């Protein structure tokens, strides 16, 4: 069909290996159209006349699939045969992270500017009815399929900001953010996080082979490699000359990229431990440890969390705006990435209503809240359906309102390769719950 191997592989990862040829071709066309038009992916400031204004208009890109004509749909057998000939080997990360993937991108995911590029000034004008307070902030993976981003942007009336956490940490985590926060006068967390693997883990340098050119980890995953694969890698390297042949190197590098393996000895690799992932994501040491939380549960909780340094950069504008503290509605809180970011920024949380279905995550958030001596009130709700007018009115009566409504959806919810876990918009409907509650809060505080 004329598509590249990378396009086909990405489509298979987005839609699943059991997707039919129509869905795969449709996904490729949607991605290509969106990349050209700015629908999802990155802000394009390559031209001089685009450097001072946000050109993205979500209302203009509402038909990504129109180029896929009916005449190209009728010959599904031909499409199926051609797609079968395309390599289905997965990329280095199910979340499309890593240096190899970034090299293929013409527009790096730098959002509305980076702290390392102060000369790159951005301007974004929001409609009056969209501005805050309350400010809203919603995170989701950028490769959501079939016009999802256009729908989200249209519903909230803002242009999305796409950012790769590799600019803030040593791990690549590509995310999109819908928010109405100001974008001027942002600042980084201190101390600034290290950006490369060997800066974060200097002890690995002694064992790091020169042919492993990785500088950053890929997107964090809940699953880790099995011991058998670790043993196979070591056995293959021990049996090979130094340096090993290309076939061995390529295989080892593929597995190292896929599973975020780190060198811990001569010819020995190991997966990242949970406390190491905590550090990479900006959480305090032992944030997910204790309280009866198992090792597997720690990995799963960390996979779906915010990258704190990245989120804190966006939320940093709130520090001067709320010197006396901030009232937060935290939807789908997870392990408290937004709360940790606000705390690390030095923004006092006078009251937080946290909504989180996982008892493990609720335990982790409550433990962190108590351990860090927070003075504000933390109200925890386990069911999003319980966030109704009565609950919102009660909080508003006690605390006067909400200043920030923050939330997010795990990257696998819309972009994972396992279709059994891609409930997305028609499953958990996280975004629409978020929008419903945001609209009710605005109504109740007189911002409708």
Image (spheres, grey):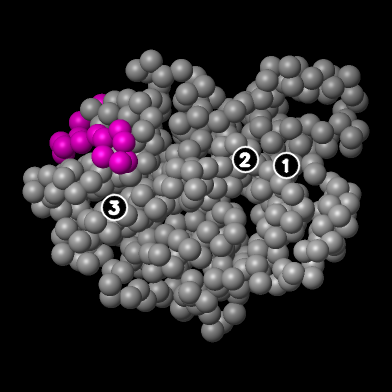
Residue 219: quadrant of the picture: top right
Say whether marks 2 and 1 touch (CB < 8 Å): yes
In the image, what residue occupies the spot 73% across and 42% down? 17
Across and down, in percent, residue 14 comes to: 65, 49
Relative height, residue 130 to residue 25 (above, below): below
Compare marks 2 and 1 and give the one earlier in the sequence.
1
The span from disc 3 to disc 2 (Cα, nearest Å) is: 28 Å
Mark found first going from the N terminus, 1 or 3: 1
Name which residue lies at 29% across and 52% down.
Answer: 437
Magenta region, residue range = 371-386
Query: For the C terminus, which image quadrant?
Result: bottom left
Q: Is residue 281 visible?
A: no
Q: Is residue 151 visible?
A: yes
Location of residue 177 in the rendering, given as x and y in whole percent from the top left corner: 44, 57
Q: Where is residue 4 in the image (x, y as percent from the top left)?
A: 81, 58
Q: Nearer the viewer, residue 92 or 48?
A: 92
Quick check: 165 left or right of 308? right
Say which element carries label 1: loop
Q: Is disc 1 surrounded by few (<14), some (14 to 19) or many (20+) residues within 10 Å?
A: few
Q: How far apart are marks 1 and 3 (CA)?
A: 35 Å
- Vertical order, 197 against 102 (above or below): above
Question: Which comes before the other along the chain, label 3 or label 2?
Answer: 2
Residue 380 within the segment the image draws in magenta:
yes
Q: In this view, does 292 lie above or below 297?
A: above
Q: Is mark 3 on a helix, strand or loop?
A: helix
Q: Mark 2 points at which residue?
A: 419
Residue at mark 3: 437
Front-most of residues 448 and 210: 448
Residue 18, numbered circle: 1
Was residue 412 drawn as part of the magenta stretch in this picture? Answer: no
Mark 2 to mark 1 CA distance (whole Å): 8 Å
């Amino acid at each position: 069909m004329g598509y590249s191997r990378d396009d086909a592989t990405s489509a298979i990862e987005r839609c699943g290996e059991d997707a039919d040829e129509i869905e795969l071709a449709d996904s490729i066309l949607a991605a290509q159209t969106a990349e050209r038009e700015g629908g999802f992916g990155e802000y394009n400031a390559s031209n001089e006349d685009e450097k001072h204004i946000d050109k993205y208009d979500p209302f203009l890109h509402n038909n990504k699939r129109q180029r896929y004509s009916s005449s190209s749909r009728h010959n599904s057998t031909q499409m199926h045969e051609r797609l079968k000939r395309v390599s289905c080997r997965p990329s280095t990360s199910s979340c499309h992270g890593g240096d190899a993937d970034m090299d293929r991108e013409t527009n790096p995911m730098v959002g509305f500017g980076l702290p390392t590029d102060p000369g790159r000034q951005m301007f974004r004008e929001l409609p009056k009815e969209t501005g805050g307070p309350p400010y809203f902030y919603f995170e989701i993976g950028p490769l959501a399929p079939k016009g999802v981003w256009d729908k989200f942007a249209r519903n909230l009336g803002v242009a999305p900001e796409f950012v790769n956490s590799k600019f803030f940490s040593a791990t690549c985590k590509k995310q999109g953010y819908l928010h109405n926060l100001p974008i001027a006068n942002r600042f980084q967390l201190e101390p600034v996080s290290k950006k490369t693997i060997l800066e974060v883990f200097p002890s690995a340098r002694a064992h790091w082979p020169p042919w492993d050119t990785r500088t950053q980890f890929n997107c964090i995953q809940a699953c880790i490699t099995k011991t058998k694969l670790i043993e196979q890698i070591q056995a293959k390297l021990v049996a090979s000359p130094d340096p090993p042949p290309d076939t061995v190197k390529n295989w080892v590098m593929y597995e190292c990229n896929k599973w975020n393996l780190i060198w811990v000895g001569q010819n020995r690799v190991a997966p990242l431990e949970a406390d190491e992932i905590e550090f990479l994501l900006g959480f305090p040491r032992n944030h997910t440890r204790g309280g009866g939380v198992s090792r597997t549960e720690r990995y799963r909780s960390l996979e779906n969390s915010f990258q704190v340094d990245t989120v804190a950069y966006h939320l940093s504008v709130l520090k001067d705006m709320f010197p006396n503290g901030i009232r937060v509605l935290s939807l789908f809180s997870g392990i408290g990435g937004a709360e940790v970011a606000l705390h690390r920024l030095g923004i006092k949380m006078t009251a937080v209503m946290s909504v989180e279905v996982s008892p493990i995550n609720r335990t982790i958030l409550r433990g962190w809240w108590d351990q860090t001596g927070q003075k504000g009130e933390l109200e925890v709700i386990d069911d999003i359906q319980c966030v109704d007018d009565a609950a919102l009115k009660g909080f508003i009566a006690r605390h006067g309102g909400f200043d920030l409504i923050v939330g997010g959806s795990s990257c696998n919810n819309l972009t994972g390769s396992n279709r059994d876990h891609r409930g997305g918009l028609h499953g958990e409907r996280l975004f629409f719950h978020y929008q419903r509650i945001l609209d009710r809060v605005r109504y109740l505080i007189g911002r409708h």
